[in-house]
């Protein structure tokens, strides 16, 4: 964990996640960990659980997400514009 915190070339999000775990290991309350790390309490809980389940590797990988909604087809946009004019 110290390697993550000391590496200046790491992304900030990895350092924040490692910091959450280090502060949690000091047995600080979740609210205090969140305040010191500058994140929300649910974020602290999320990274504590992820670390417990997957270890350091879980802190370094973001979960995959479904792709966003596809843009409207141009025909639909044209129909809506025709209705408003």
Image (spheres, grey):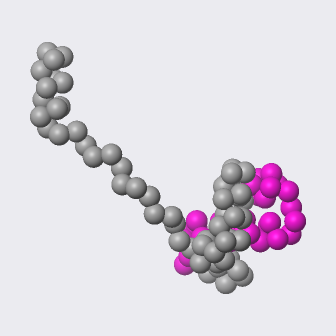
Residue at left offset 78%, top offset 58%: 33
Q: Is residue 78 shown to the viewer in this render? A: yes
Q: Magenta stretch containing residue 17, yes or no?
A: yes
Look at the picture and state if 3 lies above or below 30.
Answer: below
Residue lying furthest bottom in this view?
3
Magenta: main secondary structure: helix
Residue 45 location, x and y as percent?
A: 71, 57
Q: Which quadrant is home to the C terminus?
A: top left
Residue at left offset 70%, top offset 80%: 1
Residue 43 location, x and y as percent?
A: 66, 55
Front residue (pair 48, 14): 48
Q: Which residues are magenta?
A: 9-36
Residue at left offset 62%, top offset 81%: 7
Q: Is residue 6 shown to the viewer in this render? A: no
Residue 70 location, x and y as percent?
A: 27, 46
Q: Magenta stretch containing residue 23, yes or no?
A: yes
Look at the picture and state if 28 lies above or below 14.
Answer: above
Give left or right: position of 7 versus 37.
left
Residue 26 location, x and y as percent?
A: 86, 69
């Amino acid at each position: 964990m110290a390697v993550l915190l000391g590496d200046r070339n790491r992304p900030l999000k990895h350092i924040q996640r490692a910091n959450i775990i280090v502060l949690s290991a000091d047995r600080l309350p979740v609210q205090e960990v969140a305040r010191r790390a500058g994140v929300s309490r649910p974020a602290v809980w999320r990274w504590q659980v992820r670390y417990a389940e997957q270890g350091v590797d879980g802190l370094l990988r973001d979960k995959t997400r479904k792709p966003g909604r596809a843009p409207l087809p141009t025909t639909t946009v044209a129909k809506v514009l025709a209705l408003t004019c």
